[in-house]
Image: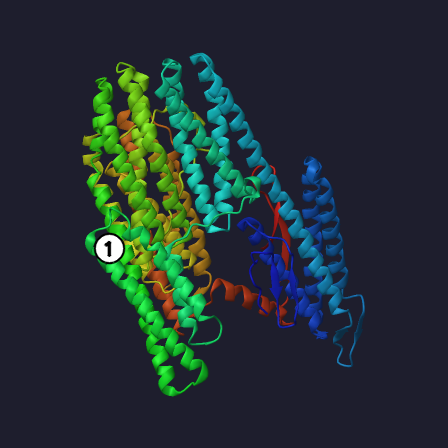
């Protein structure tokens, strides 16, 4: 018997007995989905037992214990659900109804698994059960449906919390926009900061819980805007208060407020799955997606000559070639690239014409020669379209790399700062034109990268980068104009610095984005970096008030450069090891890749590059990295539990080193320090411990890979997590193996804030 994971539209399970159930509710978060999967397995186990007419006494007792355990846990779960309903009146009616149904279904399952009811003994003394199997199926469907409804209703409270938090932020923003005195501004901004921290915490948790990768990327983009704009809002507002009659300062400030409002609205659209005025979502169109679908359709002709029309295939190619005009029409595409793209586009048309001709013949006469010609035509068409994809990728990535290299020194920004500080409006106007030209180049590059991004999350990131350059450019100009009009103003200078730093940060982000796009194209998994959320309320707030974020100076960067390089080499080792795995979706691989990405970001910090601008940024990243290390150790333990091999102790030995190191790094990152020397010592300790963790990961990965391949070859014992669960259930259904040790209890898991107690099955 096998259990299937929750589908996008609900949770379903099926078995050879014909049992299946679907809640009919869309599940959008991992927490709800993972809560339901074990329940489906447990209920299906009971149903499979009901299918067997004769069982031993031991088996009957175990079945009865499982049924009673499920019923008792449902009763506890329902009590929690009713409490949530009482505390949230708008959900009370629906929650009460769902809880009543769940309680009734749990009681029914307990009755149907009570082996004292409806039994008789055969001549051999074995018990024959006459309970109607359909009654169990009906009760199981009702239980799963009602439990899912309770969980989904509880999840709505998380959404409500985010909306309430957003409303608080908006209300305080309105006050900040209207404030007229510094004293009042400082008081309100302090409240605004606390509200933004709470909002970042809530949305960060939600982002991590989302199942849809595209929505997760959109949430990350919106949160990145809010994080960067918070500092912009502070300096832009202070500048406006200091120079109330300055038009450029007002424009600068209004731009920040408008961008924050749009980002807040985007977050709400994601968590509520709605759009303003019910406008349909316009999906970004990329050539990569079109080529992938076209190639799949062409290759599908091998299996079925009639599943699509030649008009459909021709239309798909036309759409692809239409989008290649974004490359051929671009002023930044080289003459060689443009000529090659046009040549491949024409060749693709001819190859498709030949394919259609042979395809039409094959539909009427399936001779060996014609089928061979069809295969050749398919191969040529696919090869041509992939050559086109390669050329487009080359064109987009070379342009991006050249632009990043050319503008790496940020000379235009430096010149704008100097011109503004000198009060030279003519020079500001001159460099404004150069910045506008640079902005257009980067925006165009982001548009082309979007076409070859390779995944929906990376497409979203390209769009976010494009928007950021588009908006930040004019904001830098207005900030520079304000400084030029008030060259002695410290706050105007600070404001320009903040906007320039945002531009530089986006350039660093674009460099990482380019690396990820190349990883996807070359067949490596393009892992998104871990998002650096704002600290949780009460957890680090004390440190934030007493510690001023610092940057490493040149001397300190020199001292730590060797250590950073060693960390960089370890990330390469880990990346190299993960590429050797056949299953790139394996949890061990995915966690290893994520940690490698984080370590690479810390390496960039040692060079004064990348996303981590201050020591406080590094400490936050180190804490996230440590938490990821603890998570990886859990994944590795689960992996080792599925192995039986002489090398297993070696793996366990390495895993045991990972936990204390991760805990030490966590403590180091959280410990407050004072002074420049102490801060550098803490930076050094964080990098050292991160390096030690990466060293262990680089050693663990090849061991795991070796054990996995060895076991798959039949020289050991390994079962995938899914097979392990299935085999466990199959073993439980065997009447001689179902004893007290296999009984699982339906318990309660506490979630943060108001939504406590989502349910899960826990092995005893």
Instruction: State whether residue 96 is above or below residue 4.
Output: above
Q: Residue at x 66, y 50 (%)?
A: 149
Choose top left, top right, bottom left or bottom right for residue 157.
top right
| Residue 302 to residue 86: above or below | below
At which x and y percent is residue 281? Answer: 50, 47
Locate the C terminus and report the quarter of the image it occupies: bottom right
Residue 93 versus residue 286 in the image, above or below: above
Question: Residue 752: in sight, yes or no?
Answer: yes
Q: What residue sits right under mark 1 in the picture?
A: 338
Which residue does the image show at 29% across and 55% down from the upper left?
Answer: 393
Q: Nearer the viewer, residue 69 or 752?
A: 752
**Percent coordinates x, y for residue 260 in the rendering:** 45, 31
State the residue in front, 250 or 582: 250
- Residue 689, can we see it? no
> Along the horizontal axis of the image, is 638 left or right of 757?
left
Nearest to the observer: residue 709 or residue 157: 157
Who is closer to the viewer here, 200 or 487? Answer: 487
């Amino acid at each position: 018997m096998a259990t299937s994971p929750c589908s996008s539209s609900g949770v379903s399970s099926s078995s050879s007995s014909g049992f299946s159930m679907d809640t009919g509710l869309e599940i959008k978060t991992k927490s709800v989905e993972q809560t339901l999967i074990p329940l489906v397995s447990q209920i299906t186990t009971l149903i499979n037992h009901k299918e067997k007419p004769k069982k031993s006494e031991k088996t009957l007792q175990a079945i009865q214990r499982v049924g009673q355990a499920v019923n008792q846990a449902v009763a506890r779960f329902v009590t929690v659900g009713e409490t949530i309903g009482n505390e949230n009146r708008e959900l009370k009616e629906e929650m009460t109804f769902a809880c009543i149904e769940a309680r009734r279904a749990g009681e029914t399952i307990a009755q149907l698994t009570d082996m004292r009811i409806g039994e008789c003994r055969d001549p051999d003394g074995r018990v024959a059960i006459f309970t109607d199997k359909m009654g169990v199926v009906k009760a199981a469907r009702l239980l799963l449906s009602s439990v899912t409804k309770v969980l989904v209703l509880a999840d709505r409270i998380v959404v409500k919390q985010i909306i309430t938090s957003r409303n608080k932020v908006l209300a305080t923003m309105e006050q900040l926009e209207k404030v007229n005195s510094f004293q009042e501004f400082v008081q309100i901004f302090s409240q605004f900061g606390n509200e933004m921290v709470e909002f970042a915490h809530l949305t960060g948790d939600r982002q991590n819980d989302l199942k849809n990768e595209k929505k997760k990327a959109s949430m990350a983009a919106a949160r990145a805007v809010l994080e960067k704009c918070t500092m912009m809002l502070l300096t832009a507002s202070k500048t406006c208060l200091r120079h109330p009659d300055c038009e450029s300062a007002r424009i600068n400030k209004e731009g920040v407020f408008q961008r924050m409002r749009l980002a807040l609205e985007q977050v709400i659209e994601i968590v509520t799955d709605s759009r303003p005025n019910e406008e349909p979502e316009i999906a970004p169109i990329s050539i990569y997606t079109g080529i992938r679908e076209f190639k799949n359709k062409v290759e599908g002709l091998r299996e079925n000559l009639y599943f699509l029309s030649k008009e459909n295939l021709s239309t798909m190619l036309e759409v692809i070639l239409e989008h290649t005009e974004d490359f051929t029409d671009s002023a930044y595409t080289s003459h060689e690239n443009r000529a090659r793209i046009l040549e491949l586009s024409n060749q693709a048309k001819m190859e498709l014409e030949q394919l259609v001709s042979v395809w039409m013949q094959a539909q009427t006469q399936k001779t060996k020669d014609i089928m061979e010609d069809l295969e050749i035509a398919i191969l040529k068409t696919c090869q041509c379209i992939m050559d086109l994809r390669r050329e487009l990728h080359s064109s987009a990535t070379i342009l991006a790399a050249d632009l990043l290299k050319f503008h790496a020194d940020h000379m235009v920004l430096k010149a704008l700062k100097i011109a503004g500080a000198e009060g030279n409006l003519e020079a500001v106007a001159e460099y404004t034109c150069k910045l506008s030209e640079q902005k257009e180049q980067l925006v165009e590059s982001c548009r082309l990268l979007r076409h070859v991004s390779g995944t929906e999350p990376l497409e979203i990131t390209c769009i976010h980068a494009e928007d950021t350059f588009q908006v930040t450019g004019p904001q830098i100009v207005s900030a520079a104009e304000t400084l030029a009009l008030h060259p002695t103003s410290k706050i105007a200078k600070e404001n320009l610095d903040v906007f320039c730093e945002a531009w530089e940060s986006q350039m660093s982000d674009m460099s990482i984005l380019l690396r990820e796009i190349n990883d996807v194209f070359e067949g490596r998994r393009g892992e998104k970096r871990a998002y650096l959320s704002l600290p949780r309320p009460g957890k680090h707030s004390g440190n934030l008030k007493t510690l001023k974020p610092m940057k490493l100076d040149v001397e300190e960067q020199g001292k730590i450069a060797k250590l950073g390089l060693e960390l960089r080499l370890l990330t390469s080792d880990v990346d190299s090891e993960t590429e050797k795995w056949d299953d790139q979706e394996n949890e061990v691989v995915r966690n290893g890749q994520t940690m490698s990405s984080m370590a690479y970001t810390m390496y960039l910090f040692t060079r004064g590059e990348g996303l981590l601008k201050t020591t406080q940024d590094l400490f936050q990243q180190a804490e996230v990295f440590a938490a990821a290390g603890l998570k990886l150790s859990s994944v590795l333990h689960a992996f080792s539990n599925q192995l039986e091999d002489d090398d297993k102790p070696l793996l366990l030995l390495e895993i045991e080193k990972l936990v204390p190191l991760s805990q030490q790094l966590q403590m180091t990152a959280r410990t407050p320090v004072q002074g420049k020397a102490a801060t550098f010592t803490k930076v050094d300790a964080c990098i050292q411990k991160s390096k030690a963790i990466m060293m262990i990961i680089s050693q663990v990965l090849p061991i795991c890979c070796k054990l996995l391949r060895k076991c798959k070859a039949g020289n050991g014992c390994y079962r995938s997590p899914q097979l392990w669960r299935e085999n466990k259930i199959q073993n439980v259904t065997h009447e001689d193996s179902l004893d007290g040790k296999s009984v699982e209890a339906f318990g309660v898991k506490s979630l943060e804030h108001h939504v406590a107690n989502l349910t899960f099955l826990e092995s005893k």
